[in-house]
């Protein structure tokens, strides 16, 4: 890190956060709460499909989902690839390998229609995705 950024951090630690004290117990409670965020399979599927409007690799997709607070894939990336495989088998996404060996995923027209229906019918999302999740 550049010296000026290190200095900024030191100043912020001294001035901005000087009144904040987090005990080890409080820090553990915060981390536990973050890790317990329960995201339904429907919400995960919706997030995956929203990301695949543009072409992505599985690695890119995992990072973007993590950025949304979805941590179900932490330590179990196979779950994501199971979801992607179901989407591919149902004709919702297309895949392609590039010359470097990376596999890319993106929505086909069927997937775009399903995504549009799910976004319009948020209260009925479970019904819209039921077929894919049970597959």
Image (cartoon, rainbow, N blue to C red):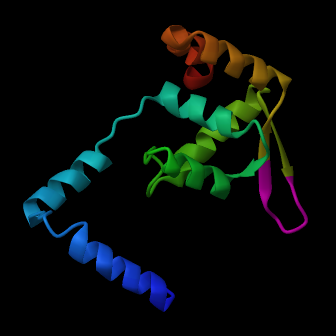
Which quarter of the image is occupied by the C terminus? top right
Question: Which residue is situated farthest in the right direction here?
Answer: 99
- The x and y percentages for residue 80 are 57, 45
Question: Which sits in the foreground, 104 or 67?
Answer: 67
Compared with 28, 34 (above or below) is above
Residue plotted at (26% across, 74% down): 13
Residue plotted at (11% across, 65% down): 21
- Which quarter of the figure has residue 24? bottom left
56 magenta-colored:
no
Q: Is residue 31 left or right of residue 58?
A: left
Q: Is residue 76 left or right of residue 13?
A: right
Residue plotted at (74% across, 49% down): 56
Q: Main secondary structure of the magenta part?
A: loop
Residue plotted at (54% across, 46% down): 65
Compared with 118, 133 (above or below) is below
Question: Which sits in the foreground, 29 or 126?
Answer: 29
* Magenta part of the chain: 97-104
Q: Count all numbered tags in the image, as a single digit.
A: 0
- The x and y percentages for residue 125 are 54, 14
Q: Is residue 73 left or right of residue 36?
A: right
- The x and y percentages for residue 16 are 25, 66
């Amino acid at each position: 890190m550049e010296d000026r950024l290190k200095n900024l951090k030191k100043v912020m630690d001294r001035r901005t956060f000087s009144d904040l004290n987090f005990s080890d117990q409080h820090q553990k409670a915060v981390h536990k709460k973050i890790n317990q965020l329960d995201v339904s399979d429907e919400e995960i599927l919706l997030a995956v499909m929203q990301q695949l409007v543009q072409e992505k690799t599985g690695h890119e997709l995992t990072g973007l989902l993590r950025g949304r607070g979805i941590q179900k894939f932490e330590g179990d990336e196979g779950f994501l690839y199971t979801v992607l495989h179901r989407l591919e088998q149902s004709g919702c996404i297309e895949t392609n390998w590039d010359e470097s060996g990376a596999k890319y995923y993106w929505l086909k027209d069927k997937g775009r229609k399903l995504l549009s229906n799910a976004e319009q019918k948020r209260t009925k999302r479970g019904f819209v995705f039921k077929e894919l999740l049970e597959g």
